[in-house]
Image (tube, rainbow, N blue to C red):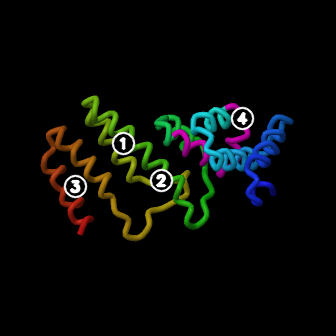
């Protein structure tokens, strides 16, 4: 293909022609977005393209992952979580990127809630960041550490006046760091 030969501009033109002709193949959207990324097209412009073809994008895991990645990068964390929750993913071994988006979106929403003084909501988001929803089809890796998540959850507990629980999480943070 043109993209494999390094002709990203030619690949872009070919994929855009396929999309304009009404291609409903999600692989076309995924590969077009990959080419646009290599051409340094803005994240916002890439997101707008994927959203214009949302029905096609939502038909396969790879294109959904690109959409969710852009949501996370552009601070649209609720959209990321809603999109992740609406699909059962079929992750192959080593396919943890979908869970990373889950974690980052929950942490960001937790931080927003914390900054508004909504400490219970923040704690809920921080705990959710440590979860592995069944629909994502990924499980915790052996030896996984939740240093950042535990620290943030500890801060939320401390703000709620639950000092003993906060202290336990802070000790977990220190233990993870050793």
Residue on which the image places disc 1? 125
User: Marks 3/4: CA distance?
Assistant: 43 Å
Q: Residues within 10 Å of mark 3 (few under 14, many from 20)?
A: many
Residue on which the image places disc 4? 53
- Give the residue displayed 49% in from the left and 42% down from the top: 72
Q: Is mark 1 on a helix, strand or loop?
A: helix
Tell me whether circle 3 and circle 2 mark residues in contact (CB < 8 Å). Answer: no
Q: How crowded is mark 1: few (under 14 residues within 10 Å), some or many (20 or more)?
A: many
Residue 28 position within the rendered picture, expressed as x and y whole percent measured from the top left: 76, 47
Q: Which of 24 and 14 is in front in this view?
A: 14
Residue 171 position within the rendered picture, expressed as x and y whole percent measured from the top left: 18, 60
Q: Residue 170 carries which label?
A: none
Q: Which mark is residue 169?
A: 3
| Labels 4, 1: front one | 4
Q: Which quadrant of the structure image shows residue 161?
A: top left
Q: Is residue 105 above or below residue 171?
A: above
Q: Which quadrant of the structure image shows residue 106?
A: top left
Tell me whether circle 2 and circle 1 mark residues in contact (CB < 8 Å). Answer: no
Report the quarter where the N terminus lies: bottom right
| Labels 3, 4: front one | 4
Q: Is residue 59 magenta?
A: yes
Residue on which the image places disc 2? 100
């Amino acid at each position: 293909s043109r993209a494999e030969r390094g002709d990203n501009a030619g690949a872009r033109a070919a994929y855009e022609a396929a999309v304009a002709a009404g291609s409903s193949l999600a692989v076309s959207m995924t590969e077009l977005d990959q080419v646009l990324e290599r051409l340094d097209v803005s994240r916002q412009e890439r997101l707008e393209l994927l959203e214009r073809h949302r029905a096609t994008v939502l038909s396969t895991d790879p294109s959904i992952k690109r959409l969710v990645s852009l949501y996370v990068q552009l601070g649209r964390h609720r959209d990321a979580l809603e999109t992740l929750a609406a699909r059962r993913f079929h992750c192959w071994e080593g396919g943890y990127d979908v869970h990373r988006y889950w974690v980052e979106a929950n942490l960001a929403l937790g931080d927003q809630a914390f900054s508004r003084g909504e400490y219970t909501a923040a704690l809920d988001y921080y705990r959710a960041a440590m979860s592995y929803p069944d629909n994502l089809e990924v499980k915790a890796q052996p030896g996984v550490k939740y240093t950042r998540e535990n620290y943030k959850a500890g801060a939320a507990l401390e703000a709620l006046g639950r000092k003993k629980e906060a202290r336990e999480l802070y000790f977990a943070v220190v233990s993870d760091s050793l």
